[in-house]
Image: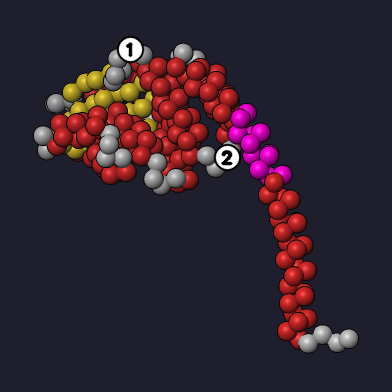
């Protein structure tokens, strides 16, 4: 018996549909089990990492969060968490005070300013050096000299004064790593308000209040329930 064309098409579709239900249904069920098993292990790993962080065991927290990241390489929250650990580690290497060294260079020549920077680097070893001047040439010379020994310079002008914040040593390494992890978190999840808030804190710490305010405002747009941030922004605007 010959089947009419519409009937033949219907039979073929029925066969394909039945096969598809079996194949895709089976894969989804297995995948679901794997995800559930991994999720429990992932949650425990993250909990242990958080506990280590809260206990001030930053290196242990970094190792645990890094293991969690291997399990979930596209997880924005873990990148943010790692950034937070690196940030605190960087502050720890800076010592008890921030900045580690601060000096106003009112009438200093370029050579005197460079000497001041070298003394600060030698004394501090790791941390943040804050130098203030009204002379553009002096500011340029400080920035160039700092770059030669690998310092990360954040420069901002306020009215007639130029402030240069120079990150050095392990503080520089960890804080820049924190910044990069926060940015990666936002690449993966552009609505991650906490990562925006953390980037704001980073830029506030290094003296770039203009960029800090931008990130804080973005964080508040995403999470207007953040009363603490709202109060901070109100005070900052005043």
At x 55% / y 20%, what residue is drawn?
Answer: 48
Q: Which residue does the numbered mark 1 point to in the structure image? A: 96
Check the picture and name the quadrant holding the C terminus: top left
In the rendered image, residue 25, in percent from the top left (x then y), is placed at 70, 53
- Residue 38 magenta-highlighted: yes
Circle 2 crowding by C-alpha within 10 Å: few under 14, some 14–19, many from 20: few
User: In front: 105, or 19?
Assistant: 19
Residue bounds of the magenta highlight: 30-41
Q: Which residue does the numbered mark 2 point to in the structure image? A: 73
Q: Give the distance between the C-alpha atoms of the residues marked 2 and 1, in whole angstroms.
A: 35 Å
Residue 194 located left or right of residue 59: left
Residue 112 located left or right of residue 172: left
| Residue 107 can be seen in this image | yes
- Relative to 48, does residue 221 appear above or below in the rendering? below
At x 49% / y 22%, what residue is drawn?
Answer: 50
Q: Quadrant of residue 100?
A: top left
């Amino acid at each position: 018996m010959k089947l009419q064309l519409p009937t033949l098409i219907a039979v073929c579709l029925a066969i394909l549909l039945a096969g598809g239900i079996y194949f895709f249904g089976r894969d989804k069920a297995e995948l679901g089990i794997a995800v559930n098993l991994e999720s429990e292990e992932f949650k425990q790993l993250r909990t242990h990492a958080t506990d280590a962080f809260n206990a001030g065991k930053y290196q242990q927290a970094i190792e645990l969060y890094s293991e969690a990241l291997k399990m979930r390489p596209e997880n924005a929250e873990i990148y943010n968490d790692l950034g937070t650990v690196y940030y605190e580690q960087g502050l720890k290497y800076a010592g008890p005070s921030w900045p580690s060294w601060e000096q106003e260079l009112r009438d200093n020549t370029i050579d005197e300013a460079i000497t001041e920077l070298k003394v600060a680097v030698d004394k501090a070893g790791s941390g943040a050096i804050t130098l203030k001047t009204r002379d553009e040439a002096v500011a340029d010379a400080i920035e160039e000299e700092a770059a030669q020994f690998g310092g990360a310079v954040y420069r901002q002008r306020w009215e007639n004064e130029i402030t240069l914040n120079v990150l050095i040593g392990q503080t520089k390494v960890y804080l820049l790593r924190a910044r990069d992890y926060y940015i990666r978190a936002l690449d993966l999840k552009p609505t991650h308000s906490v990562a925006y808030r953390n980037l704001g804190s980073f830029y506030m710490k290094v003296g770039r209040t203009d960029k800090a305010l931008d990130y804080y405002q973005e964080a508040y747009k995403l999470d207007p329930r953040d009363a603490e941030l709202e109060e901070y922004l109100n005070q900052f605007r005043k």
